[in-house]
Image (cartoon, rainbow, N blue to C red):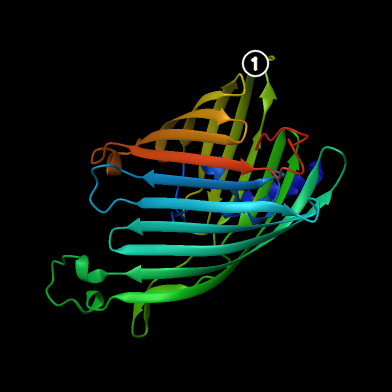
């Protein structure tokens, strides 16, 4: 298994680049289903998660994003299924993505398993160029609004142990054309590769450290990584720091209201002069709820991820 993970890492780093296409969330560790369909059904419960992000407050046309995911195990945990809904608005563009995820889990031993997942999705894309003000009057490139429905597929591998996980995925494999004029493509989807990894390290009976990373790559753009360190104490409170390469710093706060219900807040601010001088940071709110069947009672093993 160690050799497999090393090969996955090498394959990922062999592909350079990143450009924001999918919505960016500081709470990426709670949005795993959208990133990797192999995650579906791994929490031994019907898990419902919602995230709202307001990015670059004060910046005209800044991204506004929402993520809603539901997933659950099937066939006594041998597989899993989920649904993801993503809303993304940036300036004159608005995207709605609806995805269905299915995962097959293979138990390697008592503490670890590997999963393979497939994602089928529809991308409802809307570009309202009539909102834009151009320096040239009657510019033919900005005369026609675009509305389209774009089917796509994704895939991912996900490995998990009691206190460790790692995965590689590509949520949208097909590179659909988004916008263009006759005979000319001006924008298209690009294939992204995502690598996630995290763990839980007990410090003592009350405190755990939860490091994680999220690496994004696509050809012809700089590689980008989110690195986060969370500290959780008394199984109830958490706080941590996030660093996003070439972009931002962030802080995260969390509170487990009950065993099955968690809330989280994150704030990050841009490091670069390109955007940092023109906004007041980004805010996120996360809610997660685990619904356990009354016939099963409490979940036997703790859910760290």
Residue 116: percent from the left, percent from the top? 73, 57
Is residue 171 shown above or below 245? below
**Quarter-of-image position of residue 231:** top right
Is residue 35 shown above or below 236? below
Q: Residues within 10 Å of mark 1 (few under 14, many from 20)?
A: few
Residue 260: percent from the left, percent from the top? 61, 36
- In front here: 291 or 67? 291
- In front here: 31 or 168? 31
- Image label count: 1
Residue at x 32% of width, y 69% of height: 127
Quarter placement of the N terminus: top right
Is residue 53 shown above or below 189? above
Residue at x 20% of width, y 66% of height: 131
Name the residue that disc number 1 marks: 206
Residue 205: percent from the left, percent from the top? 69, 15
Is there any visible trace of residue 11 in the rendered image?
no
Q: Is residue 140 left or right of residue 271?
A: left
Residue 281: percent from the left, percent from the top? 32, 37
**Quarter-of-image position of residue 186:** bottom left
Mark 1 falls on what kind of element? Answer: loop
Quarter placement of the C terminus: top right
Residue furthest front as drawn: 294
- In front here: 238 or 244? 238
Q: Is residue 149 left or right of residue 198?
A: left
Residue furthest right as drawn: 109
């Amino acid at each position: 298994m160690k050799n497999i993970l090393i090969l996955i890492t090498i394959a990922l780093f062999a592909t350079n680049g990143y450009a924001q296409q999918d919505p960016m969330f500081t709470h990426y560790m709670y949005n795993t289903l959208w990133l990797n369909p192999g995650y579906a059904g791994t929490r031994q419960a019907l898990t419902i998660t919602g995230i709202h992000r307001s990015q670059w407050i004060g910046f005209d046309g800044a991204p506004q994003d929402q993520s809603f995911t539901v997933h659950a195990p099937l066939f006594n945990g041998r597989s899993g299924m989920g649904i993801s809904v993503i809303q993304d608005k940036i300036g004159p563009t608005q995207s709605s993505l609806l995805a269905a995820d299915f995962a097959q889990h293979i138990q390697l031993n008592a503490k670890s398993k590997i999963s393979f997942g497939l994602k089928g999705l529809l991308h409802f894309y809307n570009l309202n160029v009539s909102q834009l003000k151009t320096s040239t009057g009657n510019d033919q490139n900005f005369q026609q609004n675009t509305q389209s429905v774009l089917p796509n597929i994704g895939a991912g591998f996900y490995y998990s142990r009691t206190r460790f996980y790692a995965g590689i995925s590509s949520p949208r494999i097909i590179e659909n054309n988004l916008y263009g004029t006759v005979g000319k493509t001006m924008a298209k989807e690009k294939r992204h590769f995502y690598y996630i990894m995290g763990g839980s390290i007990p410090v003592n009976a009350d405190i755990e450290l939860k490091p994680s990373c999220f690496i994004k790559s696509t050809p012809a753009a700089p590689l980008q990584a989110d690195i986060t360190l969370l500290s959780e104490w008394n199984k109830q409170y958490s706080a941590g720091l996030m660093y996003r390469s070439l972009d931002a710093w962030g802080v995260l706060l969390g509170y487990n209201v009950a065993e099955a219900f968690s809330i989280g807040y994150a704030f990050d601010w841009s490091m670069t002069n390109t955007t940092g001088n023109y906004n007041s940071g980004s805010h996120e709110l996360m809610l997660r709820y685990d619904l356990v069947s009354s016939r099963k009672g409490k979940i036997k093993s703790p859910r760290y991820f």
